[in-house]
Amino acid sequence: MICVIPFPSQLAKRGEQFIDLPYAVKGMDVSFSGILSYIEATAVEKLKNNECTPADLCYSLQENVYAMLVEMTERATAHCDQRDVLIVGGVGCKR
């Protein structure tokens, strides 16, 4: 369901409601498969029941993944006693 949306980051800008999604960070390991499986399993039902909009799902996915990546990056920088991180290319360059 979510995979057929051509620009989920654009749709996420219109999201208003945060949907709780699985948060899978353990140490410096992260897993995205649980989030995608959860969305694929529940998105159709939530949309049918008007519990959320596609924009809400995209917004929630984006915020959840961002939080997971930030947490993992903060742990890695602390572990290596570093203060700076360089994020380059692709999505890392988007505003």
Image (tube, rainbow, N blue to C red):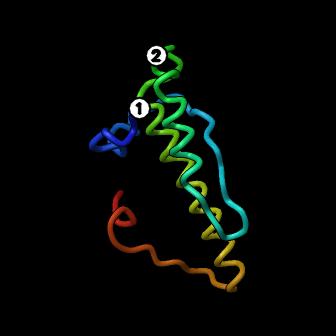
Give the residue drawn at x 51%, y 21%.
45
> Relative to the observer, which residue lies in front, 12 or 84?
12
Q: Give above or below for 1 relative to 33.
A: above
Precedes in sequence: disc 2 or disc 1 = 2
Which label sits in the foreground, 2 or 1?
2
Residue at mark 1: 55
Q: Residue at x 49, y 29 (%)?
A: 43
Left or right of 3, for residue 84: right
Circle 1 residues within 10 Å: few <14, some 14–19, many ≥20: many
Query: Residue 68, relative to residue 8: is it above or below?
Result: below
Query: x, y percentage for residue 40?
Result: 48, 36
Q: Is residue 41 left or right of residue 75?
A: left
- Residue 28, percent across and down? 67, 70
User: Which disc is residue 85 wearing?
Assistant: none
Name the residue furthest left.
Answer: 6
**Mark 1 residue element:** helix
Name the spot of residue 2 as percent of width and height, x first: 39, 38
Secondary structure type for disc 2: helix
Residue holding disc 2: 48
Three-letter code, disc 1:
Ala
